[in-house]
Amino acid sequence: MSDKTLDRALRKVRWHLLPFLILLYIISYLDRINASFAALSMNQELGLSQTAYGFGAGIFFLGYVLFEVPSNLILMRVGARIWIARIMVSWGVVTCLQALSVGPASFATFRFLLGVAEAGFFPGIILYLTYWFPQSHRARAVALFMAATPLAGLIGSPVSGWLLGLHNLFGLSGWQWLFVLEGLPAIVLGVLVFFRLPSGPDEAGWLSGEEREALGAVLAAEQHEIARCHLSSLRQGLCSRAVWLAGWVYFCVVVAMYGLVMWLPQIIAGALSGAAVMNVSLLVMITYGFAMVGMVLIGASSDRLGERRWHALGSLGLCLAGMLVLAHGTGLGWCLTGASLAAMGIWGVIAPFWGLTTAFLAGQAAAVGIACVNSFGNLGGFVGPFVVGFIKSHTGGFSDAFMYIALLIGLAALSVWGIRSPGTGRR
């Protein structure tokens, strides 16, 4: 089987799958973070304190974590097409329902239900990519897929700012229009997933028989090697020290991610002293632009050099530097510099991190291990926004909160050294 056939197959996979998956994740991430823009007017209207908003923003991840592992196991049983379609339609409906929030309790309830509805989407897609991409191509594929999150910020920031301007249209507040109009695309795309997304290469009509055979042979050989030397059983995926250490690292990264993005519009609004919402939204785009550049370049470099650990450590170093600037700098310029550096590091670490983590998981261990890492990591999505809000409400500023996040990122960098292939001892 020629390398040209495999290369041709992989080009087709990238062209047919990644743009569609990126679109799905843009909608997913936008629906996850749109509360950060809604907060610019919603908090006052619903009487949300900084602590109550941080709790509501973060409780999404408790629902997400509770249902993540079973969701990934169901995906393995029923197939990606059916299960991802179900996830998307569910979260689109709940996103729209957030417009019915009337106070702290209802806001937190809808955010929790949104997490339950979306549970399993991200780890399901990471698992799904292992069905299509060999290890040597996986970090770049993950990086391109994950570029959807900063792209969602780039696209969603001005769109969310514009939607907030629809205040009192047909009697609804701008933040209510934001939730409704940003939830509907998920429902439509969920229906498209059911009819369009193949569950694996065997269902891909756009691959020739020779291309399916070449791709399947490489992936099967890799899975056999991982199963022989590394982790493949359900018990191994749940009990592996490497899996839980990876979960701790990801927890720290996600604390930083959502501790930053769920408060970034309010941080910039404070630095601008009462600027228009659209101006705030446009400045938020700068941070997401740096995040996307960092993610794509670092992911591509990690694949090109075949190296994961030092790329992850370098990215964590960028994040740490950005958090220190945010903690000690003053004024809009330092705010944007710190946020941009931190975002480059946060998004830059994701591709090499997942390349490092998925290199020793196969079979049921891959399904449950990826879900466990993502579940533990996403607890950071609760901790980050809540702790930032709690600290700010007690200190009046963000400096101590970002110093706390910087400490976690330093501990994550030390922990990266312990993530290694259990079967062979390779790092």
Image (cartoon, rainbow, N blue to C red):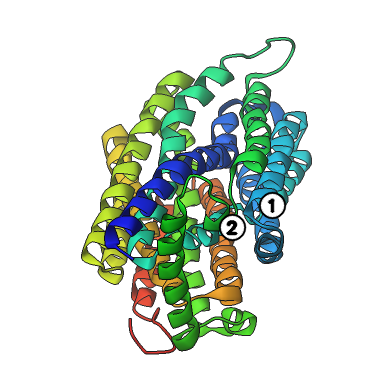
Q: Position of residue 345 (x, y in %)?
A: 32, 54
Residue for point 44% across, 87% down:
229
As drawn, the residue found furthest toward the left would be 305
- Tell me, for residue 124, which label it has, or none: 2
For marks 2 and 1, the one nearer the N-term is 1
Q: Position of residue 305 (x, y in %)?
A: 21, 65
Residue nearest the viewer, comparing 232 with 154: 232
Residue for point 43% across, 69% down:
217
The crowd level at tag 2 (other Cα within 10 Å; few <14, some 14-19, many 20+) is: many
- Identify which amino acid the numbered label 2 is placed on: Gly
Residue nearest the viewer, comparing 184 with 246: 184
Left or right of 281 on screen, residue 236: right
Residue for point 75% across, 33% down:
97
Note whether residue 378 is visible.
yes
Distance from disc 2 to disc 1, alpha carbons, whole Å, reads: 9 Å
Question: For numbered disc 2, what is the local secondary structure?
Answer: helix
Where is residue 311, by image quadrant? bottom left
Quadrant in the picture for the C terminus: bottom left
Note whether residue 319 is visible.
no
Where is residue 80, by image quadrant? bottom right
- Identify which amino acid the numbered label 1 is placed on: Trp
Height in image: 178 above or below 422?
Answer: above
Residue nearest the viewer, comparing 85 with 338: 85
Q: Position of residue 249 (x, y in %)?
A: 44, 69
Residue for point 60% across, 40% down:
196
Question: For numbered disc 1, what is the local secondary structure?
Answer: helix
The crowd level at tag 1 (other Cα within 10 Å; few <14, some 14-19, many 20+) is: many
Labelled pair 2, 1 in contact (Cβ < 8 Å): yes
Residue of label 1: 83
